[in-house]
């Protein structure tokens, strides 16, 4: 086994060798603790037949742990300065491909087809750049990739919103936008001390596993998300008031909204945060003929 990249000493050596300076704008906080990396990878439950997709390998700290656990690793890195570093640090591993690309612009399905032919079990595993956590997750979910799920590090506050259950103050349209596709749980909390440089925010790793079928079947998924977004615009307002304010011509269509709520047996004085994803699904379908 090769010496770990993710120790404070080795990381400093690598950064010095390449004269690398962190770019805050790219969310560059590298992991320097092999125990955390082993833990992250264990939550992904990879086998020697699995594939791993990584976003932002940095200098390869997590990448090498993935390379040891999986059959094939493909890592997307936006920062060109890291390419020669990765070529050096990951030279002991012949099962890693680095794609120089902004993950938000990449055709990930095509990369999987080309780089992981025949691989049945694929997980996205990453210490995400925090400034784009939500767009990355939503893109990868909407792309409908042939993956089992995600084990990803992010800002704790976002992790709490993504995994929140109805009736909690963290529960909102983001919880629903994600939990429509996957089951979501916090896998572990991560202290600031395991990063270089240390981030200003708390961090957590979450595990998302794709549903075999969505928790609710709706006429139009986009409209479901429009209804949930409208329902949470002002958290202290009732669902009726939020839908009137947030749906197109909602003010003039109060009767239609009341009828849809009645049809779904949802009290118009309830708040959005009390509705389950199934209730939102029913409500979206009941509103659909009048609004979509
Ligand atoms: N995986 C490394 C680790 O844990 O030490 C680095 C993680 S660091 C939090 C985030 C990484 O994502 C950086 O390497 C950064 O350059 C890269 N990155 C930032 N925005 C990106 C984007 N849009 N697409 C791909 N990579 C990105």
Image (tube, grey):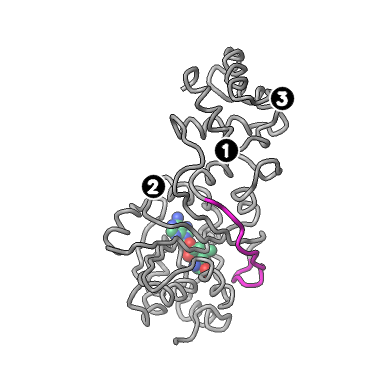
The spot of residue 218 in percent (x, y) is 46, 32
Magenta highlight range: 183-198
Residue at (41% x, 74% y) in the render = 67
Check disc 3: other Cα within 10 Å, few if <14, some if 14-19, many if 20+: few
Asked if the residue under mark 3 is in contact with the one under mark 2, i.e. CB atoms within 8 Å, the reply is no
Mark 3: secondary structure: loop
| Image vertical order of residue 141 relative to residue 11, above or below | above
User: Of helix, strand and loop, which mostly describes the magenta segment?
Assistant: strand
- Comes first in the chain, label 3 or label 1: 3
Q: Is residue 110 left or right of residue 266?
A: left
Residue 269 bears which disc, if any? 3
Residue at (56% x, 27% y) in the render = 283
Instruction: Quote the CA–CA distance across marks 2 and 3.
Output: 36 Å
Q: Which residue is denoted by mark 1 in the rendering?
A: 277
The spot of residue 177 in percent (x, y) is 53, 42
| Image vertical order of residue 252 relative to residue 161, above or below | above
User: Residue 197: within the magenta?
Assistant: yes
Q: Which of 5 and 24 is in front in this view?
A: 5
Check disc 1: other Cα within 10 Å, few if <14, some if 14-19, many if 20+: many
The spot of residue 276 in percent (x, y) is 61, 37
Asked if the residue under mark 2 is in contact with the one under mark 1, i.e. CB atoms within 8 Å, the reply is no
Instruction: Quote the CA–CA distance across marks 3 and 1.
Output: 18 Å
Task: Tell which tag, 1 or 2, sits nearer the viewer.
Answer: 1
Residue 143 bears which disc, if any? 2
Residue at (42% x, 77% y) in the render = 68
- Comes first in the chain, label 1 or label 2: 2
Residue 56 bears which disc, if any? none
User: Under 8 Å from ligand 1: the CB of mark 1?
Assistant: no
Mark 2: secondary structure: loop
User: Residue 241: within the magenta?
Assistant: no
Q: In this view, does 4 lie to the left or right of 251?
A: left
């Amino acid at each position: 086994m090769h010496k770990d990249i993710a120790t404070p000493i080795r990381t400093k050596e690598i950064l010095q060798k390449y004269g690398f300076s962190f770019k805050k704008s790219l969310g560059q906080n590298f992991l320097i603790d092999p125990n955390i990396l082993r833990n992250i990878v264990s939550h992904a439950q990879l086998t020697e037949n699995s594939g791993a997709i990584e976003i932002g390998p940095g200098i390869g700290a997590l990448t090498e742990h993935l390379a040891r656990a999986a059959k094939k690793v493909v890592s997307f890195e936006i920062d060109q300065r890291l390419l020669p570093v990765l070529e050096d640090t990951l030279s002991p591993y012949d099962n890693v491909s680095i794609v120089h690309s902004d993950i938000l612009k990449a055709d990930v399905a095509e990369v999987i087809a080309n780089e992981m032919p025949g691989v049945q079990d694929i997980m996205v595993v990453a210490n995400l750049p925090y400034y784009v956590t939500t767009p990355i997750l939503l893109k990868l979910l909407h792309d409908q990739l042939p993956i089992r799920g995600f084990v990803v590090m992010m800002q704790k506050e976002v992790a709490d919103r993504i995994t929140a259950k109805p009736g909690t103050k963290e529960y909102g349209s983001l919880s629903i936008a994600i939990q429509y596709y996957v089951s979501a749980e916090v896998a572990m909390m991560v202290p600031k001390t395991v990063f270089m440089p240390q981030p200003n925010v708390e961090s957590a790793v979450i595990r998302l596993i794709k549903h075999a079928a969505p928790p609710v079947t709706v006429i139009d998924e986009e409209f479901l998300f429009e209804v949930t977004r409208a329902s949470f615009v002002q958290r202290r307002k009732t669902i009726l008031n939020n839908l009137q304010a947030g749906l197109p011509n909602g003010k003039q269509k109060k009767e239609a909204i009341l009828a849809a709520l009645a049809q779904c047996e949802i009290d118009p004085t309830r708040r959005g945060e009390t509705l389950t994803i199934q209730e939102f699904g029913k409500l979206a379908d009941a509103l659909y003929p009048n609004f979509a």
